[in-house]
Amino acid sequence: MSDRYSGKIIRGIAGFYYVHVEDAGIYECKAKGIFRNQKVKPLVGDNVEIMVLDEADKEGNIERILPRQSALIRPAVANVDQALVIFAAARPEPNFNLLDRFLVMMGTQQIPVAICFNKADLADGKERERLAGIYAASGYPVLFTSAKEREGTDGLLALLAGKTTVVAGPSGVGKSSLINCLQKGRQMETGEISEKIGRGRHTTRHSEIIPVRGSTYIMDTPGFSTLQLQMEKEELKRFYPEFAAYEQDCRFAGCNHIRERDCGVKAALAAGEISEQRYRNYQQIYEELKNFRKY
């Protein structure tokens, strides 16, 4: 009788799904035809039940997709508990507009986000304070790490513990190096995964899940340099959480905090209670959405 296991899809490519089963390894699986008939496609991050066809070669079939807690559209992944967006503290300088776009995008999909500034060894205490201050009122956790100096990784592991975290950021911020730090010395079949799914050493071209230890997973995604948001311009303010406390002081119901008079958010901005950087990004994205809808 064939063995049946429960596991998590850590990568899917060319019709094959690679399922990580705790204490058993990685199984290369095909999805049963029933999923096509039901128009259901397995996603990276899905928890599944598999039937083992060949234990020696670690091959099997996906028999069942377990209920999803969540499903993201972009990237197309399932069962994500939180997102971690990684930018460099320096070299390159952080692109705050791009960072804010990612925060908004995750907000529209109701995924909690933490912000990580890597290469923190290149930033002095004053610069770190400035970076943290930009997001202090927004409620997003901010961490500083250095993959080079192995700094901040314990705090990052604590944030990730017991969760599936989608990790994203632009190229050149040390994302892969940081992920490698988190894997080092952990219960991870690194060689087996590399051999089984052909994971590139430096460049991520597909979304994939990396088991860190136990029920802690990192979902690595390709680097991005642009993000086009699609929503009504009036919705944007909902995804700047620091605005909420001051909107009761706006004179007009439905104030968008752009050109309206007697705006509580702009008063808070003038008083230094809201980051100028964050507000400028809000203005820019708002105008972009406004012009996008015109055409």
Image (cartoon, rainbow, N blue to C red):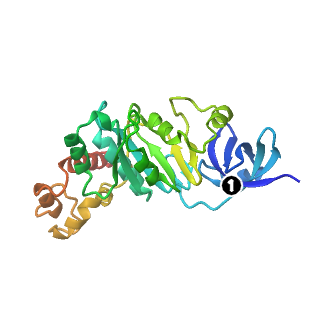
Q: Quadrant of residue 109?
A: bottom left
Residue drawn at x 78%, y 45% is 60
Relative side of 2 to 282, left or right: right
Relative side of 22 to 213, left or right: right
Tell me if mark 1 has few (under 14), some (14-19) or many (20+) residues whose alpha carbon lies within 10 angstroms of its own: many
Q: Is residue 122 visible?
A: yes
Residues 272 and 20: in front is 20
Residue drawn at x 21%, y 63% is 255
Figure check: 21 above or below 69: above
**Quadrant of the rendering where the C terminus is positioned:** top left
Residue 111, x across and y down, in percent: 44, 57
Residue 174, x across and y down, in percent: 41, 34
Q: Is residue 260 visible?
A: no
**Quadrant of the rendering where the N terminus is positioned:** bottom right
Residues 282 and 287: in front is 282
| Residue found farthest to the right | 1
Figure check: 74 above or below 263: above
Relative side of 203 to 199, left or right: left
Could you tell me the amino acid type at mark 1?
Val
Residue drawn at x 46%, y 55% is 82
Residues 235 and 99: in front is 99
Q: Secondary structure at mark 1?
A: strand
The residue carrying mark 1 is 48
User: Exactly how many numbered labels are in the figure?
Assistant: 1
Residue 116, x across and y down, in percent: 36, 45
Residue drawn at x 77%, y 48% is 61
